[in-house]
Image (cartoon, grey):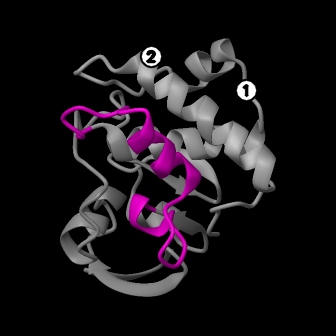
């Protein structure tokens, strides 16, 4: 076992883990951050998406050691204080979730998109979100939610709801 120092949701965390342990396993099993889901285990479904230095990353195929000296944000760290992130609010408002299993990965990928492109077109959203799978098929509502969050972000400023 090695001690791995991670910065997760603004907190420095030291965990004892095998160097080959996935970031997903550390988040869920050692840090009790269970919002990030295990889906396929191969980085193909997007359920495990977190932000690493503001980039969407599949945590199931990322070794925890690869995330040292980087800022990791999980779905639990996206909101600030008692306020949901605009994406979380929009997903609720647009009923962009059904079973909810993919939701955290969708929101984290969308957060990375909106960080780069403040007003994406529907085509840009579809292209960027490719690889995030919703087994319930709520894609049109997910797109609507991302567009709604982008609009809210533009109206209230680019850092609205962001926690880095």
Task: Kindly report the distance in space between the C-alpha atoms of the residues bearing marks 1 and 2.
Answer: 15 Å
In the displayed structure, would residue 119 be above or below residue 62?
A: above
**How packed is label 2: few (under 14 Cα within 10 Å), some, or many (20 or more)?**
few
Label 1: few (<14), some (14–19) or many (≥20) C-alpha neighbours in 10 Å: some
Residue 124, horizontal then vertical, whole percent: 68, 19
Main SS, magenta region, reads loop
Splitting the image into 4 quarters, where does residue 147 fall? top right
User: What residue is pinned by disc 2?
Assistant: 140
User: Image quadrant of residue 75?
Assistant: bottom left
Determine if the magenta segment contains residue 157.
no
Position of 127 compared to 26: left or right? right
Nearest the viewer among 89 and 41 is: 89
Q: Are marks 1 and 2 in contact (CB under 8 Å)?
A: no
**Location of residue 121 in the rendering, given as x and y in whole percent from the top left corner:** 72, 19
- Where is residue 110, by image quadrant? top right
Quarter of the image where the N terminus is located: bottom left
Residue tagged 1: 120
- Residue at image location 68% in from the left, 38% down from the top: 150
What span is colored magenta in the figure?
A: 74-101
What x and y, as percent, mark residue 22? 31, 57
Residue 82 in magenta stretch: yes
Q: Secondary structure at mark 2?
A: helix
At 55% from the left and 73% from the top, the residue drawn is 80
Q: Earlier in the sequence, mark 1 or mark 2?
A: 1
């Amino acid at each position: 076992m090695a001690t791995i120092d991670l910065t997760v949701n603004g907190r420095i965390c030291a965990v004892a883990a095998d160097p080959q342990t996935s970031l997903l396993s550390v988040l869920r099993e050692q840090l009790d951050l269970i919002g990030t889901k295990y889906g396929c285990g191969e980085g193909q479904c997007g359920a495990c998406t977190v932000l690493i230095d503001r980039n969407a990353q599949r945590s199931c195929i990322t070794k925890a050691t690869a995330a040292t000296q980087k800022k990791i944000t999980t779905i639990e760290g996206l909101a600030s204080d008692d306020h949901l992130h605009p994406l979380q609010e929009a997903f609720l408002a647009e009923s962009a979730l059904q079973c909810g299993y993919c939701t955290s990965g969708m929101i984290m990928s969308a957060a990375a998109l909106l960080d780069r492109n403040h007003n994406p077109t529907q085509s840009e959203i579809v292209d960027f979100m490719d690889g995030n799978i919703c087994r319930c098929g709520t894609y049109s509502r997910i797109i609507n939610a991302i567009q709604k969050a982008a609009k809210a972000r533009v109206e209230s400023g680019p850092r609205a709801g962001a926690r880095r």
